[in-house]
Amino acid sequence: MLRRMNSKYNGRCKVCRTPYRIGDPIYWSPQTKALCIDCGAGKKVRPSDGASQVAPKASAEFQGRASTDEKGWSRFVIDWPDLKDKAKRLIKGDSNFIGLPGNRQQSEGFVRGGSWHGFTGGQLDRWLTSGFEAEAIKGLAEFTPPIREKRRLQFLEEGDELHLDLAWSGADNYFSEWTKREIIPGLAVEATITFSAAVQAEIVNAYLTWLCRALYSLESSGVDCQVTLSVIGDGLWSGGKAHTVIRVKKENETSDFLSWSAMLSPAGLRGLGFVAFALHGESENKTVSSHLGHGRIPETQSWNIGYDAERRIVKVNAQYDATSFPEEKMTNDLRGILKQLSNSK
């Protein structure tokens, strides 16, 4: 029998190999060992070999999976490559992988975009193909504080390289070597990207572009980031409390920033995020409502950034009913967290 508990160690799920950290909720049994919260929920163990079997889901052909979290909400996780593939198919007019007609019709509209969405279908297609390269993510040298010290050349009595000119001049230290490169520990970034329908597209776009800029800066500085984005739909379907998670980049995953930057483009929420909503509905065999519920939860009552130093997780929350985007405040708060990161190496 699977037992839910908080992990005492860092590790990886025995089924899907998703990493988890100390303190993360997991499921465990002597037969299965540690399973992530998604694989453990709704699964049973075969007495013969201890292998896990997934409970039957809707017939749509995608890899996302739904489970129930500790609050009783439906939690759905989908990896970025899968969401990207489905979005590109929708743009080309192929929506057959979505079984429920209501979800299919809405998804076809999500990728077309419009003024309220903040993008056009042509832009989304281009960002999915070539990446999102806004002017705002260029020139980032001053965005983040130094994450690690630069390597320095030091002169010693013994070293890797002999400098004859110094030896001939009578200098005491005429060998040199470079200082070791500082190792940058990994960092998990979890961000909510949920807004009220009344929030102007310009505000949504400003936040997503800022988030894109921040993550680009970290990646460029050599920080190995794990990135997940959350879309919240309280009432995504009748009575449905849904927490949709898009796993953009996994820890230790080698990837080009531009390959997933479309998820942080202006189409990240009201295009790709909404498609993920529809796929979440498919996983529960539910047709999502036309209003897609609301994301008003305690964490989204204000713009805020938190840092769990023990688990090395940065949590970024957007204000659900925002009337503006406080870029300077968010940047300063993030810089403060990155200084903690730099000092804790």
Image (tube, rainbow, N blue to C red):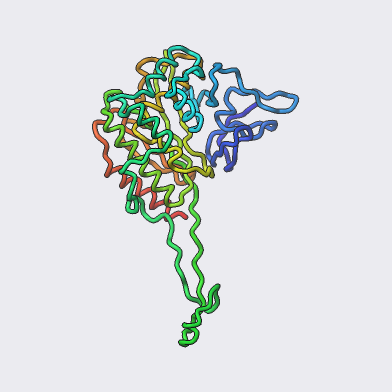
- Whether residue 239 is visible here, answered yes or no, is no
Quadrant, the N terminus: top right
Residue at 36% in and 25% down: 295
Name the spot of residue 13 as percent of width and height, x first.
60, 35
Which image quadrant for residue 299?
top left
Residue 249 appears left or right of 44:
left
Q: How many marks?
A: 0
Q: Can residue 304 be seen in this view?
A: yes
**Relative image position of residue 45 (x, y in whole percent):** 68, 25
Between 165 and 345, the one lying in front of the other is: 165
Percent coordinates x, y for residue 190 in the rendering: 43, 37
Instruction: Give coordinates of residue 291: x percent, y percent.
Output: 35, 17
Seen in the picture, residue 318 relative to 184 is either above or below; the reply is above
Q: Residue furthest left?
A: 323
Q: Which residue is drawn at 60% across and 36% down?
A: 17
In the image, 168: left or right of 135?
right
Q: Which residue is drawn at 51% across and 71% down?
A: 177
Q: Residue at coordinates 49% horizontally, 60% vertically from top-left? A: 181
